[in-house]
Amino acid sequence: MLALLLLLQGADGAGTYSGTAKQLDVHLPRIETQAKIDGVLDDAVWRQAAMLTHFSQYRPVDGRPAEDSTEVLVWYASDAIYFGIRAFEQHGTVVRATLADRDNIDADDHVAILLDTYLDHRRATLIAVNPLGVQEDGVWSDGVGAGAAGGPSAGGRFDATIDLNPDYVYESHGRVTEWGYEVEVRIPFKSLRYQSADPQDWGIQIVRSAQHSGYEDTWTPAVRANASFLIQSGRLVGLTDLRRGLVLDITPEFTATVNGAPVTPGGSYDYTGKPELAGTVRWGMTQNLSLTSTANPDFSQVEADVGQVTVNERFALFYPEKRPFFLEGLEQFDTPNQLIYTRRVVQPVFGAKLAGKVGPMGVAYLGAVDNSDQSASGSNPVFNMLRLRRDLGPTSTLGLVYTDRIDGDAYNRVLGADARVVWRKIWFSEAQIAQSWTHDAFGFHPGKLWTITFADRTGRAYGNHFELLGIEPTFQDSSGFVPRTDFVVLRTYNRFSWYGRPGAPVEQFTAILGYAPIWRYADFGTQSHTLEDTLQTFLVANLRGGWQTQLTLSLNHFGFNAADYAGYEVDRALDTIPFTVPHGLYQLPGVTLYVNTPSRAVTVNAVLGYAATAIFPEASEGRQSRFSLTAALRPTPSLRIEGRWVHERLTRARDGSRFSTADIPRLKLEYQLSRSIFLRYVGQYVAQNQVALADPRTGQPLLVNGSAAGPVVTNDFRNDVLFSYKPVPGTVVFVGYGASLTEDDAFQFQHLTRASDGFFLKLSYLFRM
């Protein structure tokens, strides 16, 4: 009855638009007034708003009516667009809402508003709120990986990349009610980039996530059998006379750090302080172009990167971008194969960025001057990164990328082109070719990268992917993330999905069969054997109530590249002999089990795996066991406790002896005093122990470049405490302390020694003109 009364309150509005009836062209009323954003939809103006209703289920099973009713009221004024959300819940008091930090509401019930302000079906601004109005924002990109930023990404999706790094200024408040929850949102046009046309149409999609069921509902009836999610959105029709006014954001910064380090091992300890003044200016040149510049910025991180096991890793590990200056508009730098990776700019003294869209052409440029301590010659390395991306038809694109890093007389330049074509609605093909030119102390080195996705089918019951990627050994990208060269890989995947009936315990079951042979670049197309092969089967089950399990079966072949062992010798005590690189290892099986519980007051993710594998540091066969457990506890709306433990053990197959052990526990405690204030503690212990390298044939010690390859032990205990006040993006007060401690024996906590520590203060204020 209450839902009916609330529905009748909006009966005199601008019309009701049913998603299931495909009433997807929404004519918004323009009302020159303001609403009080307090989480209560009682202002008279809401009765004049357009109403979006009748949602459909999208995940885990598409094409079904939504179990819970959702209504979204929409109207706009000259300077902002307003949304009023009523999310009804018929299953009792199951609404999940916490007083979380920004971008940390994925474990709560929430509603996301996707605004495709260019109506190009490629990217949309994501504005999300939980039942208390806590905000999450970012960019939804169809078919593009977040290569420049790398995360965090919401949801682990296959239909899009959701980059939560960008932050926008908008208002939101909400409340939990006896029938569900309601939220009010006001988004100033000053915070958005959009077309210069008048009038103009925007794409719109509303996505509601309910944690008690694990369901995701959409306003328009989106289906999985489509290569584009955003093209299935509705439209806000006839928006006119949108006024941003002057868009000029000035953010002065003050930072002070006091860093400590031992003067001599076991001796005195010395602290040095360093105050810094900095500033960032952002100018909205037009509705669709913005220019940002920064001088002497603070590029510190307020939280350490999550620890990763580095034993037996052959290639560089990827860490996401977290630094504020890079984040706005960073999604426009995304390219296939991550040819732009902004963390290559380590400590810039100056930076400038232009991002936006001119007609069908997306434009993004980043220039930066790095600190001289990042130079091999003592000069200041200069970075230039340019990305152009032109729309072709409804969802296809053509792109160009150029980067360079100039360090004195040395340089690295990369020029590439890429194209993505969507055809017959559920298929897409993609290609990229890039050339690098590198000049360094060893001479001049050109190199090529190329890739082609012949076909990718996004069907509901069946999908596939066929891709070929090749990178020459001389290809180098000092402005991107290309961790491996000198190979060609063929990737093939076939997916089969089955869907349970409504109420069934198994709502969706998916089987994915994958095969990926890898050749050395020079061997591809010849009669030579592959360097590596991976055959995998993924079995994924989505269970009723939000549970998910996955079983991965693999069969691998690994080869050893002789060039990687050029400096190896066998120490026979009386003499040394050259190291003989063993032949490849074949038919190495592996199995991994994943279990994810629903998002509740306690959420658990567990991974258990065992595999026969290669021990690359000594070119031998090994057995790897791995276990990781992540548990998130939210006993109150304000307190969040997250624990993570990763354990990995590697033994030699020939005798069962231990090669390495890694244990990385991590504890994160957050207490949210209000939406803008929190206290956080992060403690992380990285314990990795690797024995001395031995010849896999004789067991005798190995020498690497003439020196004994002895054991490697790491026992690092990192602790960080932070007070954070962030009322709006750009205005912050950070006060923190961090310390790195070491000890000889892992987890004893009796003879810890400080390796370094530091205090820091950061103050910044956003002046929005």
Image: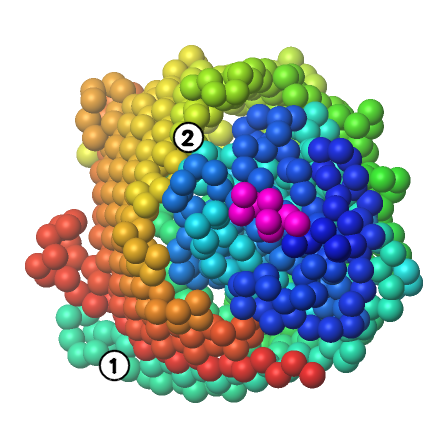
Q: Is residue 683 visible?
A: yes
Residue 199 in the figure: left or right of residue 433 = right
**Residue type marked 2:** Gly
Over which residues does the magenta segment extend? 1-8
Q: Is residue 7 magenta?
A: yes
Identify the mark at residue 270; answer none if there is no mark: 1
Tell me residue 140's x, y (percent).
65, 48
Which residue is disc 2 drawn over?
545
Inspect the image, locate mark 1, and give the three-letter code of the amino acid beneath it.
Asp
Looking at the picture, how far across and down is residue 643, in whole percent?
28, 48
Residue drawn at (59%, 49%) of the image: 5
**292 left or right of 751 in image:** right
Q: Name above or below for residue 612 compared with residue 739.
A: above
- Residue 479 occupies quadrant: bottom right
From this viewpoint, is residue 416 visible?
no
> Residue 384: x, y in percent?
71, 63
